[in-house]
Image (cartoon, helix red, strand yellow):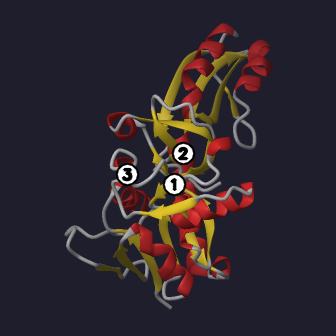
Amino acid sequence: MTLKIAVPNKGSLAESSALALREAGYRQRSDLRDLVFIDPENNVEFYYLRPRDIAIYVGSGELEAGITGRDLLIDSGAKAIEILPLDFGRSTFRFAAPSNSAISEGDLAEKRIATAYPGLLADYLARKKITASIIKLDGAVESSVRLGVADVIADVVSTGGTLRAAGLSVFGDVLLNSEAVLIGRVGAESNEAVQTLVRRLSGVVMARQYVLVDYDVKSSDLEAACAITPGIESPTISPLQKSEWSAVRAMVRRSDINGIMDKLWAVGARGILVTDIHACRL
């Protein structure tokens, strides 16, 4: 049976989603005008859709899986589930108001809040028992306060540059931490093709987050060095021709590698090498 997967057709998630799928071994369209692309080797059909619509199609059962933002999944109210976070497309959902305003979250009662995510906002307000008017907009939410349509906004924030340009600043707690996620229809986890997709994408995520570190260390310093690089299960240790020395290999987080190299050097490790991981299964 052919696996049908929804992929963002444009926007910030599109290019990163296609790249992740390519790294996972799936072919992707070369012409951005293509709405459907078939990968016969993997028996997969890819459907390129608006990111906001993907959860609806997957939740309806028309497609088995898709890639979209966590914020869009929750906002849609669709009967789809998050299967795997993909570690790209990170953003936060925040309240924002004019920079010269002293407003806080406790002042939101009876305020007009503009947003392109009414479902997500309504759910948050209900949980906080805040009564406010939700002004639904399709885009350019940051202009609504200046134009007098709303008192504050609730929007997805990546760098905050767009808000600052509009004279707005965030306030209150983070409503939601979002990123790109693999979603599926209810029960999709039992689909063998979906399980393969999850394993492959998990391998891509891990390969991007980790690197391999190799080093030589005296046997007397081996325990201290391995405590710095415990690896996923445990480090690989091999004896060297030079007596009392061992070669060690382990996976470590990419973000920590420079500090780890410093620590290894300090305990006596030498010949420290770092290698990228292109794919893995753990």
Which residue, given by chain and number where applicable, does mark 2 sit on? 95
Do the residues bearing badges 2 and 1 touch, measured as CB atoms within 8 Å? yes
Q: At label 2, which amino acid type do we have?
A: Phe
Q: At label 1, which amino acid type do we have?
A: Ile
Q: Work out whether mark 3 precedes mark 1 in sequence or the reverse, and give the earlier one.
A: 1
Q: How far across and down, in percent of the image, does residue 44 sit? A: 42, 80
Q: Residue at x 75, y 38 (%)?
A: 234
Q: Is residue 5 left or right of residue 138?
A: right
Crowd rating for badge 2 (residues with CA inside 10 Å; few <14, some 14–19, many 20+): many
Which residue, given by chain and number where applicable, does mark 3 sit on? 144
Q: Is disc 3 placed on a helix, strand or loop?
A: loop
**Is residue 8 depicted above or below 156 in this figure?**
below
Which residue, given by chain and number where applicable, does mark 1 sit on? 113
Q: How far across and down, in percent of the image, does residue 277 sit? A: 50, 43
What is the spatial separation of the Cα atoms under label 3 and label 1, in whole angstroms?
9 Å
Q: How far across and down, in percent of the image, does residue 232 sit? A: 71, 42
Q: Residue at x 48, y 82 (%)?
A: 57
Q: Is residue 149 left or right of residue 200?
A: left
Q: At label 3, which amino acid type do we have?
A: Ser
Q: Is disc 1 placed on a helix, strand or loop?
A: strand
